[in-house]
């Protein structure tokens, strides 16, 4: 029942289940396993001993059909595990052009955006959301239901139990913010005006001593009305677990 696109390579001893859809130009290495209701977009790579589409580890699972969707040109390195959702119809998603390095785990119901990089040995508990262009270093643990903002950098071995703000560098244990992600934002073409505004927003929100409500109001009243600033403010306002400052 597997659906295999054009120009797909499948190595020896790979195991592919009957409900899998593999897009054009994918490369499935030997000893990889793809099971469940899993869809791989075009141009993906699945390296040896990765298991994509395994049953959720959530004990609340009581049956039903759940899914994994992987975007295009995403690379899943050795021993990566990505689980299907828990509730009937739930999808675990990884976007386009992502790199998930060796020994990483993406649990049920996680949603990773596009151009996300996750270094070796980082584990996402269930229902985690990662926005586009986030970079997460190795050996991080991410608590269930946390959000990781776009264009951020998360330092090695950070234990993430609250939301990680977008555009900033966050790390340490307990974690704290360490300014904007200058290198990442510059490489991706953010204007000097936007970088300066985000730098000032970080100072107001994370270093001024104001509470969150006061800090966000100050950002809105004193800084340019830029999309990046609006997204940072909205990220803080919509948090359910709190945001690391």
Image: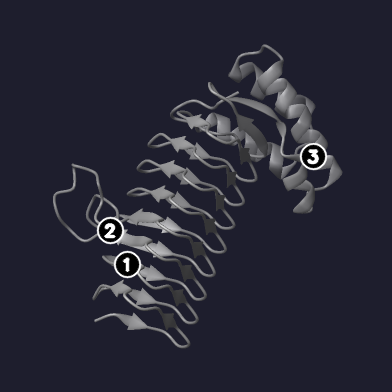
Vertical order, 201 against 209 (above or below) = below
Mark 3 and mark 2: span between their CA atoms? 41 Å
Looking at the image, residue 155 sits to the left or right of residue 24; the answer is right
Q: Which residue is mark 1?
A: 33
Vertical order, 46 against 213 (above or below) = below
Residue 214, x across and y down, in percent: 64, 16
The residue at the point 55 percent across, 59 percent down is: 98
Q: Which mark is residue 195?
A: 3
Residue 244, x across and y down, in percent: 56, 26
In which image quadrant can residue 203 be found?
top right
Q: Quadrant of the N terminus?
A: bottom left
Mark 3 and mark 1: span between their CA atoms? 43 Å
Say which label, 3 or 2, has the lower sequence index.
2
Say which label, 3 or 1, has the lower sequence index.
1
Q: Nearer the viewer, mark 1 or mark 2?
A: 1
The residue at the point 51 percent across, 46 percent down is: 130
Looking at the image, residue 149 sits to the left or right of residue 193; the answer is left
The residue at the point 54 percent across, 30 percent down is: 237
Q: Which mark is residue 54?
A: 2
The residue at the point 34 percent across, 57 percent down is: 91
Circles 3 and 2 in contact, beta carbons < 8 Å: no
């Amino acid at each position: 029942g597997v659906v295999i696109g054009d120009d797909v390579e499948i190595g020896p001893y790979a195991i592919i289940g009957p409900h899998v859809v593999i897009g054009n130009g994918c490369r499935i290495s030997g000893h990889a396993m793809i099971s469940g209701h899993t869809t791989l977009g075009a141009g993906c790579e699945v390296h040896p001993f990765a298991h994509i589409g395994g049953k959720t580890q959530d004990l609340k699972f009581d049956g039903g059909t759940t899914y994994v969707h992987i975007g295009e040109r995403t690379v899943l390195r050795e021993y990566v595990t990505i689980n299907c959702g828990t509730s009937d119809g739930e999808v675990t998603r990884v976007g386009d052009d992502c790199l998930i390095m060796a020994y990483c785990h993406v649990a049920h119901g996680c949603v990773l955006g596009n151009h996300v990089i996750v270094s070796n040995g980082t584990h996402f508990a269930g229902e985690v959301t990662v926005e586009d262009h986030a970079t997460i270093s190795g050996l991080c643990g991410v608590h269930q239901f946390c959000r990781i903002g776009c264009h951020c950098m998360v330092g090695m071995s950070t234990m993430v139990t609250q939301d990680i703000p977008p555009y900033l560098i966050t790390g340490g244990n307990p974690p704290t913010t360490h300014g904007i992600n200058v290198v990442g934002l510059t490489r991706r073409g953010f204007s000097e005006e936007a970088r300066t505004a985000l730098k000032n927003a970080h100072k107001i929100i994370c270093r001024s001593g104001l509470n969150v409500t006061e800090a966000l109001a100050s950002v809105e009243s004193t800084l340019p009305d830029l999309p990046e600033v609006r997204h940072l403010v909205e990220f803080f306002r919509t948090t359910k677990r709190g945001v690391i400052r």
